[in-house]
Amino acid sequence: MPATALDTTTALVLIDFQKGITALPCVHPTDEIVARAARLAAAFRARDLPVVLVNVTGAAPGRTQIARPAGTPPADWAELVPGLGRRPGDILISKRRWGAFHGTGLDEELRRRGVTQVVLGGIATSMGVESTARAAHEHGYHVTVATDAVTDPDAEAHHRAVEKIFPRLGETGSVDAIIALLEQGGARG
């Protein structure tokens, strides 16, 4: 369903816009995705709405069957990209799983601020963004995904998430459409 409204207590959650992830080859140029996410962040900050920046700092604990790249990632792998324009008031959440809710303080941070809706952007669409969208929906948040502020290394996985999964979890819209809703004050209480 296309984005129709934003709650007055909406937060922006940007997932894995960090040096190690944005350096990966993706379906869309990551610098363009980061620029769109930064526009959204600026619009949220201008309205004193929460901006949450999520990074992944390692793998989930326990046994996995996934082959991991050999070696140690570069020291700056988990650092957020400067293009997001991080501000002192932004909330930083570090995670060790695909989704931003499990094992982090994200839900508590949002509830403390009275947040009822989240707008999501990030990399990778089919992993961090989709996992976070599913968990947000399960936690009872209204979910909106900025479809041109997400990308994935796999075109088919990206398309499936955007076309099939996200519309079942909430609303979707472009960065421009979401900013227009913010500007119109088209928020539901």
Image: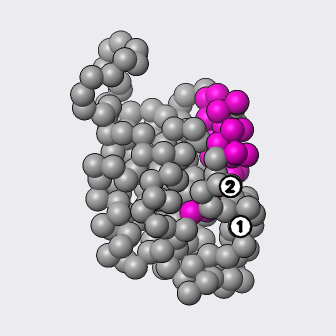
Residue at 65% x, 54% y is 168
* Left or right relative to 27: residue 123: left
Give how far across and how far down residue 31 sits, in percent.
Answer: 63, 42
- In the picture of the structure, the residue carrying the numbered disc 2 is 167
Image mark count: 2
* Left or right relative to 122: residue 63: left
Where disc 2 sits, the SS reads: helix
Compared with 30, 24 (above or below) is: above
Could you give the CA–CA distance between mark 1 and mark 2, rounded to whole angstroms? 10 Å
Q: Quadrant of the N terminus?
A: bottom right
Compared with 38, 161 (above or below) is: above
Compared with 71, 106 (above or below) is: below
Q: Are marks 1 and 2 in contact (CB under 8 Å)?
A: no
The amino acid beneath tag 1 is: Ala
Residue at 40% x, 18% y is 66
Asked if residue 151 lies in the magenta stretch, the reply is: yes
**Residue 61 visible within the image:** yes
Residue at 68% x, 70% y is 179
| Residue 172 or residue 27, whichever sits in front | 172
- In the picture of the structure, the residue carrying the numbered disc 1 is 3
Sequence-wise, the earlier of marks 1 and 2 is 1
The amino acid beneath tag 2 is: Pro
Tell me which segment is drawn in magenta.
143-164
Question: Where, by quadrant of the figure, is residue 73 drawn?
Answer: top left
Q: Quadrant of the C terminus?
A: bottom right
Residue at 60% x, 57% y is 169
Give how far across and how far down residue 14 sits, in percent.
Answer: 50, 54
